[in-house]
Image (cartoon, helix red, strand yellow):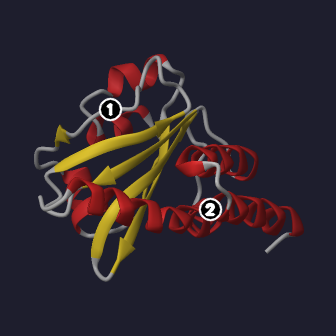
Amino acid sequence: MESRTLQLLHQACGAVAARGGREALYRALDHALGELVGHRLFTILYTSPDAQQVIRLYSNQPGAYPVSGAKKMGPTPWGDLVIRRGQPYIGNTADDIRWAFFDHELIASLGCDSVLNIPVVVEGKTLGTLNLLHQAGWYEERHVALATPFAYLLAPVFEAVRHEAGPA
């Protein structure tokens, strides 16, 4: 890893250890991935144990994408790929965004036509996702490798949210 990547990863790890709470980690990830990978919209979603609900824990654009309570997630091809199968998703066109998200018009209004979703999978279960969106054609496979170590810093947060939420 490049020295700047390691420096930002170290800072994000420090946010996990600090008493700044979850929000400090979310902001550290937002900053690090904004610098290393790039994004216009950055969100963190928790997934319920039954994969039927998601909770937005963080958004860098709360006016458009506010932090929210639990929302039902119906069956979608994106959900099957990212949530159920635990695979990252890269979409680089407006058509890719339309395929993946019902709110594609809102996403487009923010100038976002590409997406990178990194699922956090522990023992075969997707606990949540880290989501970056940017202009068309922005994301590449190398961004998955850059973003994944940062995403996994969320595993203890997702486990804590799961514990707080109780059984699905």
Q: Nearer the viewer, mark 2 or mark 1?
A: 2
Give the CA distance from mark 2 to mark 1: 22 Å
Position of 26 with respect to 9 (left or right) is left
Above or below: residue 76 compared with residue 121: above
In this view, the residue in front, 121 or 104, is 121
- Disc 2 designates what residue? 16
User: Which quadrant is the C terminus positioned in?
Assistant: bottom left
Residue at horizontal 71 percent and vertical 44 percent from the top: 31
Is label 2 in contact with label 1 (beta carbons under 8 Å)?
Answer: no
Q: Name the amino acid type tagged 2.
A: Val
Q: Position of residue 16 (x, y in %)?
A: 62, 62
Question: Quarter of the image holding residue 95?
Answer: top left
Residue at horizontal 16 percent and vertical 44 percent from the top: 73
Q: Position of residue 126 (x, y in %)?
A: 30, 67
Q: Name the amino acid type tagged 1.
A: Ser
Q: Position of residue 53 (x, y in %)?
A: 18, 48
Residue at horizontal 28 percent and vertical 80 percent from the top: 124
Q: Secondary structure at mark 2?
A: helix
The image's mark for residue 130 is none
- Disc 1 designates what residue? 68
